[in-house]
């Protein structure tokens, strides 16, 4: 639940700055949530993010990257949001 709340807070703050395109990082190696079919990203998390962005009038630009790079990319503002299956750890909690 915390993951979804954080995701939506990030989305809302990103949209507040007037961006037309939302850059979202993911790691497409966690079927059925996010994975590749050919060169197309598919899965529950992909569909969820696409639906939220569409409802708010934004296009999603996907950035498929290594799992370990997701949070650093978010912290360095290389992406506006991330969506991927992730568990809380003491290290992640600090970040």
Image (cartoon, rainbow, N blue to C red):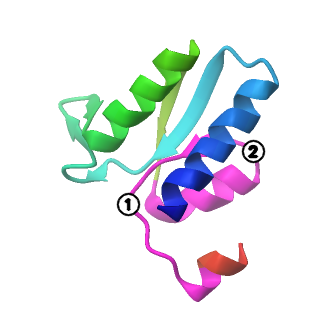
Asked which quadrant contains residue 85, the reply is bottom left
Q: Position of residue 38 (x, y in %)?
A: 18, 30
Q: Is residue 46 magenta?
A: no
Asked which quadrant contains residue 80, the reply is top right
Q: Quadrant of the C terminus?
A: bottom right
Which residue occupies the foreground of this view, 20 or 54?
54
Residue wearing tag 1 = 85
Mark closer to the chain start, 2 or 1: 2
Residue wearing tag 2 = 77
SS for tag 1? loop
Q: Position of residue 17 (x, y in %)?
A: 82, 25
Residue at image location 67% in from the left, 14% down from the top: 20
In the picture, measured across the screen, residue 60 lies left or right of residue 11, that is left
- Is residue 58 something that shows in the picture? no
- Is residue 24 something that shows in the picture? yes
**Quick check: 53 above or below 75?**
above
In the picture, measured across the screen, residue 5 lies left or right of residue 36, that is right
| Residue furthest right in the image | 17
- Residue stretch in magenta: 66-91
Residue at image location 25% in from the left, 34% down from the top: 42
Q: Position of residue 28 (x, y in %)?
A: 32, 47
Q: Are marks 2 and 1 in contact (CB under 8 Å)?
A: no
Q: Which mark is nearer the camera, 2 or 1?
A: 1
Which residue occupies the foreground of this view, 45 or 40?
45
SS for tag 2? loop
Asked which quadrant contains residue 87, the reply is bottom left
């Amino acid at each position: 639940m915390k993951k979804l709340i954080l995701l939506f807070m990030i989305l809302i703050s990103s949209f507040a700055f007037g961006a037309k395109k939302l850059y979202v990082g993911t790691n497409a190696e966690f079927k059925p949530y996010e994975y590749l079919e050919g060169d197309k990203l598919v899965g529950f998390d992909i569909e969820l993010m696409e639906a939220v962005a569409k409802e708010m009038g934004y296009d999603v630009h996907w950035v498929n990257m290594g799992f370990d790079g997701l949070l650093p990319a978010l912290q360095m503002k290389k992406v506006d949001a991330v969506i991927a299956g992730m568990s809380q750890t003491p290290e992640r909690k600090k970040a």
